[in-house]
Amino acid sequence: MITPGSVGQAERRREQWIRARMAVVLALLFIGLIGIGGRAMQLHLGEQQSLKWVAAKQYRAVIPTAPRRGKILDAKGRELAIDVPVQSIYADPRQIRDHEAVLSALQTVLPLGGEAATIRRRLAQGGKFVWIRRRVEQDVADRVRALKRPGIHTVEETRRFYPNGALASQLLGAVGLDAEPLAGIELAYQDELGSQRGQLVYQRDARGRVFYTQSAGERPPLANVELTLDKVIQHQTEISLATAVASAQARGGVAIVGEVATGRVLAMASMPSYDPNDYARYEQSRWRNRAITDTYEPGSTFKVFIAAVALEDGMDPERRFDCERGQLRIGHAVVHDHDPYGILSLREIVKVSSNIGALKVAQAVGRDRFGAILQAFRIGVPTGIDFPGEVAGILRDPRGWQPVEMATIAFGQGITATPLQMTMAFAAIANGGRLMRPYLVERIRRDDGVVMHEAAPTLVGAPIRPETAQRLTELLIQVVEPGGTGTKAASAAYAVAGKTGTAQKVVEGTGRYAAGKYYASFIGFAPAQLPRIAVYVGIDEPRGPYFGGVVAAPVFKEIVEATLTYLGEPTRNASVIVMKRPQETERVRQISDRAISAEQKVAASEPASDSAARPDEGRFLVPDFHGMPVREVMRRTGEAGVAVRLEGTGLVVEQQPAAGTLLVPGRTLAVRCAFPE
Amino acid sequence: MNDEGTTRRVPFDYWLLLCTLLLVGLGVVMVYSASAVLAGERYGDPAYFLKRESCFVLLGLAGMTAAARCPYPVWRRVVYGLLALSALLLGCAYIPGIRSTVGGASRWIHLGPVRFQPSELAKLTIVIFLAYSLEKKAARMKSFAVGLFPHMVIGGIMIVLILGQRDFGSAFLVASILFCMLLVGGSRLTYLGAMVIAALPLLYFAVASVDYRRKRILAFLNPWSDRYGSGFQIIQSLIAFKEGGLLGRGLGEGQQKLFYLPEAHTDFIASVIGEELGLIGMLCLLALYGFFCLRGFMTAWRAPDSFGRYLAFGITVLLSWQAVCNLGVVMGLLPTKGMVLPFVSYGGSSLLVSLVAVGIMLNISSYRKV
């Protein structure tokens, strides 16, 4: 029998026990919660490299979609290389149960042909991703989607598209299937053009689908490369060059158009070329940008350096040299001229391109001075153009030149140079003796307007004085005048200056000259009075006629005329003021300013008002004819419709009215000529 | 109530209610965040789970209100009925026409348009039954035949029925409840110790015999050994916490729920909270559960009779222990076993039963000894 008191006591003890045990359970639960809290801190704040790595990896899209690329634009913002969207089809083997059923369904809309076996094997291997077909037409992609087969997906990719086909292909380069740059600007500026780790912009879910790709705002801005190249000039240059190469049945050719004052490359063409849209079809040799990757023995164009150093050292252009009637033995070698010449002045040596004359001049200036001028023009040194693959050419140390070697170098054999080096040297002459560094990329600008890179003209050196450049220009103008070797380069529209070159080619590996293999070139600039562009034309191994003056000079003329016309350069009858725009009128004034010496300048040609046309449109701005031959006077006035009254013969000593006057058509210009004392 | 004269009514525990409502509110928000992408894809309606969860919440709140208004001694009278119902429903889950299988586990039965998880009801039932039985056998709890054996039999049947549905988590919870309540109810510690030792080989057998459970254990021990297989879920969960950092990615900004994290809106919702709300959010969540636990124990402490005390204690342990286990799983401290986070995870049965259980506690809290 239990007493109520003891029951109460036992009850109370039990009660205490219950409470004690409850407290223990409560404590355990709290310990659990605190443990969880500690673990939370560890997980949230701890450094766990493995987790970070997995997270980074799995959020990133592994679908190897081609990342976006920036555009390549020409100087005027015209598109040279762009991305276009295309559809690609892939399979996720994890989601496919019956490979054969899926494959045969696919075959109904997309004939797989020989690839079927490969795809079947890859599907069987498993994994997450198998390409079925890259870059299909939109309707094919639509039809594949319409199959609604699980595990078969389409994804939008981009394809690099060159809207102008082969235009400037050696400069632009090409882009492979997985957006890997293969050559040219595409390769050289991959860091800028390629989207910065493009995959990161995609977020993936665990089923491999891409999320949030539509929010383009999160994508990093793309950078566009803006070239100095002008699409129109490039196009005209390529057409002229291609036509010449084809008609001469030549192995290839190079043409360059450079802006004299800055070193901007306006056009750079190599033949044969290729279409970067379909690059796989062409052999690698067509990818070469021959203007900088190939070297040639320049031939007679090199005589410009002999003339440059002679004039720089104060030699009179009229100084005479014995040209040995076309044949001169030096050591064991015999130097020939294409025509036998007797006594020629320096001026005539350049004009008729006498090899013997050139070497005589070289002997006169001496090895050291000749070597020094070549180094000053940076022959045998890469120009430093912002384009990959440039070579230096070979110019041996002048101190080691043997007499024969110096003799041949004087007329451009026994050394090699790239077409671009020669172009820049001529441009330096045109630029008053200031040698510029050539460049192809004007700026790199992002979509959002941020300029990442901006080129500026760079002066490399000043190999000759401005006066020397002026005198040398006069010699080079003569080359295209009657009796010169480059008459076919003469243009009715623009005064040009330049030099022909016909180099014998060396048989590769032997060092011996190959019979009947020539490199014909013409290098020059225009307009001769105030040069704007320097142009190089080289034709490699023409069949039939092989002289630079025959094969290359006409191409030069074509390119000069097309380019200057396009650039709005006033033609040589610029004195006929027909300018519609003030800046062109300004250009006319500059030219006439140059023609008119400072004292005789008349304030007749006031700067144009801002109105569209000048009231004196169509009138003839009389140039300074003093010292000009009659024929030059006739040529300059010929197209202006101004009658000329001539008195005497020789060079102009007096003119009426004075230079700078404006003549209405129908009025008469009187000049008196005499031979200088 | 058998000792009518010795109790008085006080207002129920507002803190417990507030704490519960905060957890439920957080749950609704997080379920939406975690499931929107999945729902949009599967049902074409990003709010699909949100809408359903909201319905469950309303239903649950109604159930909670009803339970809070119903004097808790009533549960004494329906305890055998509840036991029979639970066993019946658990049995139904074995009948192919009625059961519904999700992910290899047949835990659900169809009740008209909705699915119900009988194990959720079973958990509450076992708490009520034990509270009733422990009170009734109070003095004889030390005896094996009276104090231990009947409870072991009833609990064991429940556990076996639940295990048969491959619901290891619920079985584990029922076993935990059994242990804790017997402990508090006054069973001999030696019996309980023996019980645990006897359970170990059974536990081992239960785990090792079932392939997926063995994999889960292995994955728990070294998730990196099978990164894309059994270890995938836990690694994804750990990544979520890591990515969340101190302040989290922000509500709705989580990435792991984009199908990386399986069952992001149910069992692994804590990962989403961790990723989106960061450590701060996790600590708040833990604080809420801690507070809930505390208020639950205070209710048990102050309960006027043993039945109320055991009932409040059992419910508190049931819900708190479940939260601890779930968080332990998502944080890689415990092996995966399929257990929802009470109040927060998506799931009608769990929410309804949990809220009814809170209602019972609220009712208990409104009685005090004189």
Image (cartoon, rainbow, N blue to C red):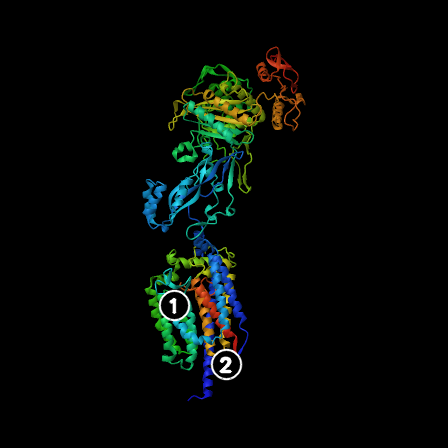
- Asked whether disc 1 touches disc 2, contact meaning CB atoms under 8 Å apart, the reply is no
Q: Is residue A266 above or below residue B75?
A: above
Instruction: Identify the mark nearer the N-term, 1 or 2.
Output: 2
Image quadrant in which you'd find residue B124? bottom left
Find numbered disc 1 in the image and state the secondary structure of the residue it sits on: helix
Q: Is residue A274 above or below residue B180?
A: above
Q: Position of residue B118 (x, y in %)?
A: 40, 67
Q: Amino acid at mark 1?
A: Leu
**Relative to A380, B93 lies left or right:** left
Same-chain status of marks 1 and 2: yes
| Residue most extreme to the front | B112
> Which of the pair A637/A262 is nearer the observer?
A637
Find numbered disc 2 in the image and state the secondary structure of the residue it sits on: helix
Q: Position of residue A553 (x, y in %)?
A: 48, 22
> Which of the pair A7/A194 is nearer the observer?
A7
In three-dimensional space, the C-alpha distance between marks 1 and 2, rounded to whole angstroms, equals: 35 Å
> Count the marks: how many?
2
The crowding category of the residue bearing disc 1, from other C-alpha atoms within 10 Å (few below 14, some 14 to 19, many at least 20), is many
Disc assigned to residue A594: none
Chain identifier of the residue bearing label 2 in the image: B
**Relative to A587, B235 lies left or right:** left
Q: Is residue B103 above or below residue B14?
A: above
Q: Which residue is mark 1?
A: B89
Q: Amino acid at mark 2?
A: Glu
Q: Is residue B34 above or below residue A181?
A: below
Q: Position of residue A357 (x, y in %)?
A: 49, 19
| Residue most extreme to the right | A603
Chain identifier of the residue bearing label 1 in the image: B
Disc assigned to residue B4: 2
Image quadrant in which you'd find residue B191? bottom left
